[in-house]
Amino acid sequence: MSIDGRGVQSVEVGGRILAALVKAGKPLMLRELATMADVAPAQAHAYLVSFRKLELVEQDAASGRYQLGPFALQLGIARLRSFDPLRLAAHAVVGFAEEVGLMVAIAVWGTHGPTIVQVQEGSDQVHVNVRTGTVFSITGTATGKVFAAFMPPKIIEAQLAEELRKGARIQGVGATTSRKELEAEVATVRQLGYATTESKPVTGINAIAAPVFDYSGQMQIAVTLIGPTGVLDVGPGSTDAKALLAFTQKLSTQLGYAPNVDEDDSQEEAGHAEIVAAPVTRRRRRA
């Protein structure tokens, strides 16, 4: 066993083997596993012997294939019990807002619909009245459209029906649209993996919102970038959209979310579009 400044190399190699099993999502033969972990089969076998003793890995007697064992499950459950989506996101958005230089808001599904629970200012100050407790409309905001696209319909239907019935008389932020228009917008949101608004509901202010999923595939929160029209780019595949998606993907992964790679064709239908990571670049202050 050798140790360098980055840690214990043998543990890192073992971690690659376990990570390969996680990524595969199915039992693997020794050679398949060794190839995915980029180690020799003999080396992989030595690690697997120890992992079996710890019950991190188990081997099917009939097929000889390896899969994660009961102790791996216990570790996963312990991780999930100790992780709160809001606490995780609350810490993370502080750095993210500083990196992108924009306002970042976290929203949950509340009694009256999408509700802001945290607002983090960026270096580029945004003059818009968004604060903790603000309720957004489902149809008239990027945040609301994300919930409409990725939350189970039975959860949002009652609030959506009430919103459409009241129209301009709703108390939440954002003007309502028709159900038909919302359905078309939701289809686009599911395809892109995020929702946008341009110069509305506040003139001169843009927004991009994306979902964060947990280990069960359930949407837990929405994270929304808010910025001036000339600063926040809401175009398809924009740098800002990619940065937000990279951020929300990381949060989802930390909550145990792992899209099934064998179901790429059905992801859009299920509302879990592929998320493309992008580097976050620090934004200059406007003069």
Image (cartoon, helix red, strand yellow):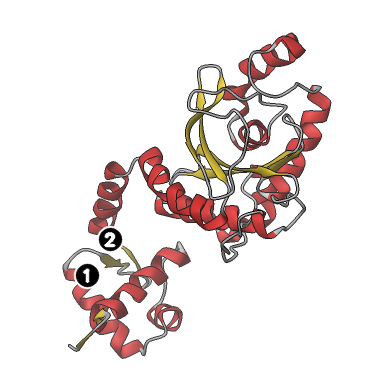
Write down the quadrant of residue 7 in the picture.
Answer: bottom left
- Up-down relation of residue 126 to residue 148 (above or below): below
- Decide which of 280, 209 is in the foreground and name it: 280
Secondary structure at badge 1 equals helix
Q: Amino acid at mark 1?
A: Arg
Identify the mark at residue 69; answer none if there is no mark: 2
Determine which quarter of the picture holds residue 140.
top right
Please give left or right for residue 77 compared with residue 134 in the image: left
Instruction: Pick whichever, 149 or 70, lies toward us.
Output: 149
Is the N terminus in the top left, top right, bottom left or bottom right quadrant?
bottom left
- Left or right side of 223 for 271: right
Q: Where on the picture, by quarter, is residue 128?
A: top right
* N-term mark: 2 or 1: 1
State the SS at label 2: loop
- Residue occupying the point 28% across, 61% down: 69
The tag on residue 52 is: 1
In the image, what residue type sits under mark 2?
Gly
Mark 2–mark 1 CB contact (< 8 Å): yes
Q: Is residue 33 above or below residue 75?
A: below
Residue 223 shows in the view: yes
Residue at 69% over, 15% down: 163
**Image quadrant in which the C terminus is located:** bottom right
How far from the left and from the top, in percent, is residue 116? 51, 29
Q: Is residue 28 above or below residue 282?
A: below
User: Residue 133 at x, y = what percent?
Assistant: 49, 23
Which residue shows up at 68% across the image and 33% down it?
A: 145
Residue 257 visible in the displayed image: no
